[in-house]
Every structure is written in structure tokens, then in C-alpha cells.
Image (cartoon, helix red, strand yellow):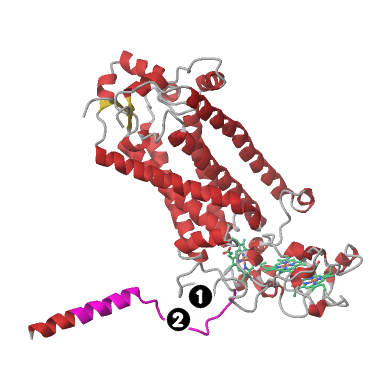
């Protein structure tokens, strides 16, 4: 009898150990909105997946044409004029090779925002399926009068019109172009940068000099720290 | 066990510093993990904290904890102010408020740095220490406000326009870089590596400083204590060997964590989408 009990104890503690160590069960068929969000609680990992680990992905495979920068794909000989399309129901109507290109090839400036790069959203999760209406087209879900409800609130529960005025594709705040498109961001960026750079300009040389100066000046003997 | 040290920080102050240190490093690590998630380095840090999303969760909770600590510290300050001698006491020598005297001492210190003049007669707090204190103080306000705005973006966009979040994001980011750069380079160097403090200035952990170093480095403070007959009450003994070992371990752990974040952050800064 005693031997048995000992055996049970071993088995029970092994089962407890397995329960503690083993990962939880995983459920497939979960709603997948992005590569990052896929396995989040089920796996011990960085929670961030490379493009070869998950399909489909927004990023392009690592092939390129030598000598051709990827953001210079000449989608239109008169790129400046096409902004006039801003009120079309299908903003890509008549755009050549649209079907065989990826969004980021033609819209590099819109492809490095936080939603795309960090949260790994696809463009279509916001811009929707075909046809992609121009932002200001009256019935576009992106139209500022309904953007918060039709787009943002899909993921940000309770999004208001004010929330939707967050600029998804912000200009580079350091760039002079931002002065036109988003002056508040431009000024605040440079004010903060000035504070940061100013602090370092004062304190880095100060610290450096201090280090050198003390190398030259021996510390005077102290009673308690000398024996360490 | 000899009476060789002068009390400099109370237990409460040291606790504040310890909590600030731990949470600052946690915020730095989780924040950088998310910022650098495109690089293997960032993914490694994120892995430590359970992934990209948990980093944010931890970041927000630790941030709220820091703000709570800041609030407590604020009331602690109010309680510590000598209200009887009120406005004058703020300009006292034990006060950390920046005073005209500090400009003079900073100037003299610079002269010392370039070898023109002797060591200035610092009192209890050097100007760089006061600067550190207030840098954290305002940094806390800035990071706290922008952090709360971003963490509760849907609610906060009722108070501010949504595009304010773009602005808050960049303020949060630049201030974070400033704070980490300052702490990981300047604060650590002055606290650990400069020759007179090497290997580590234990004042903030032990609560006391060596009496002879005070006499040399902060002569005005020492003489003031002596003149007011406060010296006896301020003298204390050195911590035991075991506790000193713990101080070194904590200090160096913090420093290496900071340097890891600093160096990795600089090396990888070209590889991320800003």
C-alpha cells in the first residue's frame, strides 16, 4: 500500500509539472487581422512575424531591379497632375498596370505609417476592396464625414470624428514639406528636437571634459572608501 | 564599523529612486522593443517581455505606476517644504530649486574643467544634480501626459483633436530619446565611471557619502553642517559588506541594461521606419 501511494505521488507531481510547463491549447480558425495579431497568446515568441512566416503579406519579396530604386517606379509620366483624381469613385480608373502592382510600389509615401509598418495592417483593411474610392469622393468610406464610423471604428471601438482626424499617413515631420501639410507637427518636432539637441550639446562635452579632467586629477584619499 | 559617512538621502528618497530606476528601465526596454520591432534586436527585447503586444500592455501599466509614483512624490514635496519660512526656504541651501548661485558654480566648474581654476565650493546639491532632478520632473509630466493621450487615444481625442495624437506621438518619442540618452550616457557616466566615483557612487543606494569626499567635493555643505552643529547628527556608519555587494549588483545591472539599450538603439537606428 505504501509503495503505491509513493507511486501516485510521483505521477501526480509529474502531471502537475506538465500542466505548468505545457503551452495552452491553440485554436485555429481565429479571426486574423494581421500577422502580428495572429498567435499572440498562444506562443512564446517575439509576436512578430517575418513575411515568409505568414501569408499573405503586404511586403514585397527581396527581389529588385539593380539600379532602380523601389520608390521611383514611374507609374505615371505626370504624377503631379493625377492628384486631380481626388474625387473619383474609382481612383485607379485608367491607371495602367494597376492590376499587376502592389500598393506600395506606386504609393511609397503612404506605405511607411505606423499602421502599415508596425501593426502590419494591409492597405485594404482601411481602403477597402475594389474599387478604391478617392478620399474625398462623396460616398467614399474615407470621406471625413463618415471615416470614423466606416473605417476607424472597425478596429477602434467608439472612434469619433475627432479621433479620425488623426493623420494616418503623416508627412516626415522634419521635412520642410511638413510645414505646409502639418505645421503643428513640424513646429513641435523641431522645438522638441532643439531641446534634445541643446541638452546634449551642453552636457555631452561637459561630461566628456569632466571625465578627462578627473583622469588627470587624483582623488584625495578618503577614510572609508580607500580600503575597497 | 566606523563613523565615516554623512547622511545624504533618506530611506524614502532612496525608495523613490529605486522605483524610478526600475520603471524607467522597463519603460525604455518595452518602448524600444516596439520602436525597433522591425529589427532582430527589437524582436529580442520584445521576446523578453512576451511579444509586441505585451510590451505595450506592460508599457502602459508601468507608465501609470510611474505617474502614481510621481503624484506621491509631488505630495511628498509639498509635505517636505518648510512652510514656516515659506518663500525664503525654497531658496535655502538644502533646496533643489535652481538658484542664481548655481549659475555661478556652473561657470566656476567649467573653469575647473578646463583647468583654469580650483574646484568650486559646492554646497549640498551641484547644479548638474539639480538639473537631473528637474529634467526627470518635467520629463515625467511630458511623458505622462502624451503617454496617457496615446494609451487612451479614443477617449483622449474627445479632449484634443485626433491629429494631436500625431503630435503627442512625436513629443513622446523625442522626449524618450532625450531622457534615455541623458540617463544612459551622462547620468551613468557621472554616477559610475568618472574617476572620483569609480566604480560607483553608492550615495543613492546607501543613503550616505564618505565624509572626506564631502569635505573635498562639497566643502560648503560640510562647513555649513559643522557651523550649525549638525554634523554629529548627520554622521552614520558604512553599510556592511553584504549590502554593499547588493548596491553594486543593482547599480551595475541597471547600467548594463541601459548601455545595452543605448548601444543597440544607436546601432539599429538606421534599420527602422521612423
Q: Nearer the viewer, residue B85 or B129?
A: B129
**Mark 1, residue position:** A39
* C-alpha gap between disc 1 and disc 2: 8 Å
* Label 1 SS: loop
Q: Which of A170 and A102 is in front in this view?
A: A102
- Both on one chain, marks 1 and 2? yes
Residue under numbered circle 2: A26
> Residue at 82% of width from left, 77% of height from top?
A98
Q: Residue B160 bears which disc, if any?
A: none
Residues in magenta, as a range: A10-34
1 or 2: tag closer to the N-terminus:
2
Asked whether residue B195 is in view, the answer is yes
Q: What residue lies at 55% left-to-right and 48% top-to-bottom?
A: B263
Point out the image quarter for the C terminus of chain B. Answer: bottom right
User: How many other residues sit within 10 Å of disc 2, few (<14), some (14-19) or many (≥20)?
Assistant: few
Work out whether residue B218 can be spotted. no
Work out which residue is located at the far left of the displayed protein and give it.
A1
Amino acid at each position: 500500500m505504501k509503495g503505491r501511494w509513493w507511486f501516485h505521488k510521483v505521477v501526480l507531481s509529474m502531471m502537475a509539472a506538465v500542466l505548468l510547463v505545457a503551452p495552452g491549447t491553440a485554436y485555429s480558425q481565429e479571426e486574423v487581422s494581421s500577422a502580428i495579431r495572429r498567435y499572440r497568446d498562444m506562443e512564446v515568441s517575439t509576436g512578430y512575424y517575418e513575411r515568409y512566416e505568414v501569408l499573405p503579406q503586404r511586403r514585397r519579396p527581396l527581389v529588385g531591379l539593380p539600379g532602380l530604386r523601389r520608390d521611383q517606379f514611374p507609374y505615371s509620366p505626370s504624377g503631379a497632375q493625377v492628384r486631380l483624381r481626388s474625387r473619383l469613385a474609382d481612383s485607379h480608373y485608367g491607371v495602367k498596370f494597376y492590376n499587376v502592382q502592389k500598393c506600395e510600389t506606386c504609393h511609397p509615401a503612404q506605405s511607411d505609417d505606423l499602421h502599415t509598418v508596425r501593426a502590419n495592417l494591409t492597405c485594404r483593411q482601411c481602403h477597402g476592396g475594389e474599387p478604391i474610392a478617392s478620399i474625398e469622393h462623396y460616398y467614399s468610406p474615407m470621406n471625413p464625414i463618415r471615416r470614423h464610423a466606416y473605417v476607424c471604428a472597425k478596429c477602434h471601438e467608439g472612434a469619433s470624428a475627432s479621433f479620425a482626424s488623426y493623420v494616418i499617413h503623416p508627412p516626415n515631420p522634419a521635412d520642410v514639406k511638413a510645414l505646409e501639410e502639418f505645421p503643428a507637427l513640424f513646429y513641435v518636432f523641431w522645438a522638441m528636437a532643439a531641446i534634445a539637441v541643446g541638452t546634449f550639446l551642453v552636457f555631452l562635452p561637459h561630461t566628456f571634459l569632466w571625465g578627462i579632467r578627473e583622469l588627470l586629477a587624483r582623488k584625495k584619499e578618503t577614510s572609508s572608501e580607500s580600503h575597497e | 564599523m566606523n563613523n565615516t559617512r554623512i547622511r545624504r538621502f533618506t530611506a524614502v528618497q532612496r525608495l523613490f529612486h529605486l522605483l524610478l530606476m526600475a520603471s524607467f528601465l522597463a519603460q525604455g526596454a518595452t518602448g524600444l522593443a516596439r520602436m525597433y520591432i522591425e529589427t532582430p534586436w527589437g524582436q529580442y527585447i520584445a521576446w523578453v517581455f512576451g511579444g509586441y503586444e505585451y510590451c505595450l500592455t506592460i508599457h502602459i501599466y508601468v507608465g501609470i505606476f510611474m505617474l502614481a509614483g510621481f503624484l506621491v512624490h509631488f505630495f511628498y514635496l509639498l509635505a517636505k517644504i518648510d512652510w514656516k519660512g515659506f518663500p525664503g526656504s525654497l531658496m535655502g541651501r538644502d533646496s533643489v530649486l535652481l538658484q542664481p548661485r548655481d549659475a555661478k558654480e556652473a561657470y566656476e566648474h567649467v573653469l575647473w574643467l578646463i583647468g583654469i581654476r580650483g574646484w568650486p565650493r559646492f554646497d549640498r546639491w551641484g547644479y548638474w544634480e539639480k538639473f537631473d532632478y528637474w529634467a526627470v520632473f518635467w520629463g515625467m509630466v511630458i511623458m505622462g501626459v502624451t503617454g496617457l493621450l496615446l494609451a487612451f487615444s479614443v477617449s483622449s481625442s474627445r479632449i484634443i483633436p485626433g491629429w494631436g495624437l500625431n503630435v503627442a506621438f512625436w513629443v513622446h518619442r523625442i522626449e524618450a530619446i532625450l531622457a534615455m540618452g541623458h540617463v544612459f550616457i551622462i547620468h551613468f557616466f557621472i554616477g559610475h565611471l568618472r574617476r572620483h566615483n569609480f566604480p560607483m557612487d553608492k550615495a543613492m543606494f546607501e543613503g550616505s557619502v564618505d565624509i572626506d569626499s564631502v569635505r573635498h567635493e562639497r566643502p560648503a555643505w560640510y562647513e555649513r553642517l559643522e557651523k550649525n552643529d549638525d554634523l554629529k547628527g548627520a554622521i552614520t556608519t558604512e553599510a556592511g559588506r553584504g549590502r554593499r555587494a547588493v548596491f553594486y549588483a543593482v547599480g551595475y545591472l541597471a547600467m548594463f541594461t541601459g548601455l545595452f539599450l543605448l548601444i543597440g538603439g544607436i546601432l539599429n537606428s538606421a534599420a527602422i521606419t521612423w
